[in-house]
Amino acid sequence: MRYQGPRSLWLRYFDPKHGVVEVTLVVEDGVVKRSIRGFERVLGVDSHLDLSNLGIAIPGAIDIHEHLRGLELEHKEDEVSGSLAAAKGGFTLVIDMPNTRPEVRSIDVAQKKLESLRLAVVDYGLLVGLPQKASELREMLYLPGVVGLKLYPEDLPRFEKSFAAEVSRAKALLVVHAEHPMLIKEACGPGERWLCRPVEAEIAFLTELRGKIVEGVRLHVTHVTNVATLAYAKRIGATVDTCPHYILLSSDDERSLGCLAKVNPPLRPPGVGEELLSWLPLVDALSTDHAPHTAEEKSADFSECPSGIASNEIALSLTLDLVSRGLLVVDDVVRLWSLGPARILGLTQWGCIEEGCVASYTILDMKRVVKVDPSMFVSKAKVSPYTGWKLQGAVAATVVRGRAVYLEGEFLERCCGEPVGA
Ligand code: DOR
Ligand code: ZN
């Protein structure tokens, strides 16, 4: 951690137990040193930041599923563009995925990826991919910043208990993209991909995985698309996230928007998202699965274009809009984007305001309306299935360890994301 002297922050902080409280925080080295109720001028600090008028502060939002790409996929996104986009979207910590080129499946590539991640403007963690040998996984899991292993559908046949044992020993996470490789076909056209990659594929993956994990593994099922997978994952003791697109979009959007709404697992038929929304109390977190591809790549023929939706800049607005429509409350936003992800990652000092807490906060302006215009994205993926949507609720500022990285449309302190747990 690069030393950072004492600074003070004024926040109107949304405390899930006590409602909105006015607070002065003295932050040193990214951590709360003193927490004073009310707004006070503190003597002896290097700088002072008044964020109290911008909106309400919530514990720093965390995105546990992002593809920052980099390495040989820099044309799609890199650690700087992706993390700036994340900061603009309110995220103070993001977890990066291993399916870049080359894939992060060896100690060498993992080290290179972690080196590039040092350029991120928000805190970061990395999931590694399945290597050839369990001993190599062990080495990767102990690299600072690595939070666990990510399994993709194609990894399932090769995954065995020796890998699971390493994950358990390292107290790391096992995150799975649950779609059984035997139940995936690629022949379906727009609006019908849910038939080629059915809900049964999600559940079949988990059923087979169950026989391959060992006691003590913290299993997390990412981007569940429907209530049946959610219920099954919870029954086997996993934590679960879903993404805004599985709640807000459907296979009808895939039919009308084509590649812009092509994503894996695919969008489900109308009604499935509404059902998922009503079962959100069982969901542990939201994630964006920010999966950037260029406009050119996304303009290819439907059968050829890459899957993935880039949405880290607007995911909070998409969720806040549900609050403005009375379908969620701010408590849900805090649980799903901040406290839930922190719990999944095992971060106990996250985004609270007491002494010893990591001073990362997201400031929300519930009144501002955002019109989605992907040409204005900071991400290199300047395309979106949400173009033209008007969303009530915006991110006004993103504070990472006491630094205002993003403030009202500007990037201020563009430095120094830290590996999670540092
Ligand atoms: O739609 C997807 N895009 N699903 C994945 O699993 C990967 C991701 C990507 O990396 O583009
Ligand atoms: Zn993904």
Image (cartoon, grey):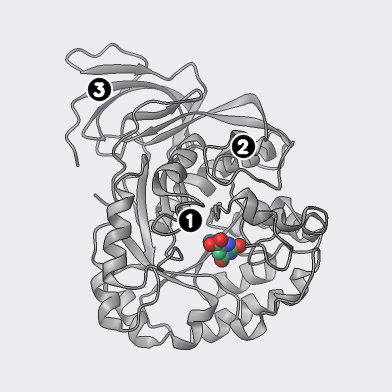
Q: Vertically, is 327 above or below 167?
A: above
Q: Residue at x 45, y 42 (%)?
A: 81
Which element is circle 2 on? Answer: helix
Identify residue for label 3. Answer: 7
Identify residue for label 2. Answer: 317
Q: Vertically, is 211 above or below 327?
A: below
The three-letter amino acid code for the residue at tag 1 is His
User: If you read the primary sequence from the N terminus, does the residue marked by circle 3 or circle 2 appear first?
Assistant: 3
Q: Residue at x 45, y 37 (%)?
A: 87
The reply to whether discs 1 and 3 touch (Cβ–Cβ < 8 Å) is no
Identify residue for label 1. Answer: 67
Q: Residue at x 68, y 67 (%)?
A: 304
Q: Residue at x 42, y 56 (%)?
A: 96
Is residue 102 visible in the rendered image? The answer is: yes
- Report the number of discs: 3
Q: CA distance from mark 2 to mark 1?
A: 20 Å
In the rendering, at what x and y percent does residue 59 appear?
Answer: 43, 38
- Ligand 1 within 8 Å of the CB at mark 1: yes
